[in-house]
Image (cartoon, helix red, strand yellow):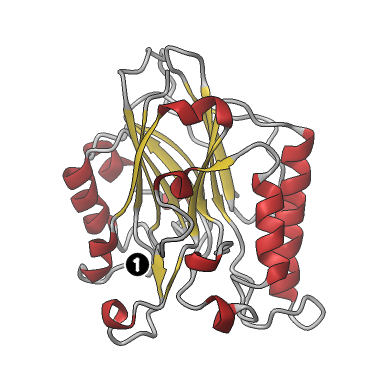
Amino acid sequence: MCKRVLVKTRIPVDPVGMRLITWNINSLRLRLPLLKQIVEQENPDIVCLQETKVPDPLFPVQALNEMGFVHQVYKGMKGYNGVAILSRQPLEPASGMPDWCTRSDCRHVAASIATSAGPILLHDFYVPAGGDIPDPDENEKFAHKLAFVDEATGWFARTPPARSILVGDLNIAPLEHDVWSHRQLLKIVSHTPAETERLKAWMATGFQDAMRTITPESEKLYTWWSYRNRDWRKSNRGRRLDHVWMTPDLMHGLRDIRVLKDVRDWESPSDHVPVVLDFDPA
């Protein structure tokens, strides 16, 4: 069963400036050494993970404690999906979050972080990939993906976000330069109009695309490269599937966003790379 886990303690006021990393790790236990290396390199305050692929009883609490993340909120299941928020600062799990598509498949976790200007609500999502056939009538996985995004859009429209950050593997590359070839990928799952229009509608419920605030839409920007590419760097057939959204009331604090592209060259990497957000929460 999916669970939220909280290490309870008094919530202090944050220091000025925070660093958050979001990463589809594609198996937390398998890639714990890579996570440790990233943490040592970047020293984040918060890490949001997707595709942890670990049931809650086997979640590596102690190993993450040793990295400094003594506050952990997670939902996981065996072999599939799974999301986690890891923090050096206390977290308060968000209440009233939906069971998306009534599947209880561990694709979303949310938590509140106290700051000097008031709490920030952090959402960590792993949207269904959608399979290979971009037809909801022929492909149940694609139908599930569209239904998931529609449901999330409706929920956020009814519950307008404020002082919120949404990150994760949303499995959709919405803009022309979020993929290596807009023309060739229009009929490929992750960049079809049915998906991109829905993702933009979800973001329009109250978020802004923080990554594209830092990197203009006219520039190529990727966070994922397929394992099928023998030389991923040379072919550079990437997609921006991982996202950072912020509500307008937090955008003044946006400092920088970096894609850690070199992590894709590390031994036994995920096909996604981490994205680093630096912001002032005040």
Quarter occupied by residue 134: bottom right
Quarter occupied by residue 236: bottom left
What residue would you read off at disc 1? 270
Q: Amino acid at mark 1?
A: Ser
List x then y, in percent, for residue 122: 52, 34
Residue 87 vertical placement versus 182 (above, below): above
List x then y, in percent, for residue 116: 42, 12
Q: Residues within 10 Å of mark 1 (few under 14, many from 20)?
A: many
Query: Which residue is depicted at the point 72% across and 39% down?
Result: 156
User: In this view of the protein, which residue sits in the foreground, 238 or 114?
Assistant: 238
Task: Label 1, secondary structure: give it.
Answer: loop
User: In this view of the protein, which residue sits in the foreground, 203 or 79?
Assistant: 203
List x then y, in percent, for residue 75: 53, 47
Answer yes or no: is residue 3 visible.
Answer: no
Residue 83 vertical placement versus 164 (above, below): below
Query: Which residue is depicted at the point 63% across and 78% down?
Result: 186
State left or right for residue 177 relative to residue 271: right
Answer yes or no: is residue 107 visible.
Answer: yes
Query: Which residue is depicted at the point 79% across and 35% down?
Result: 158
User: In this view of the protein, which residue sits in the foreground, 254 or 146?
Assistant: 254
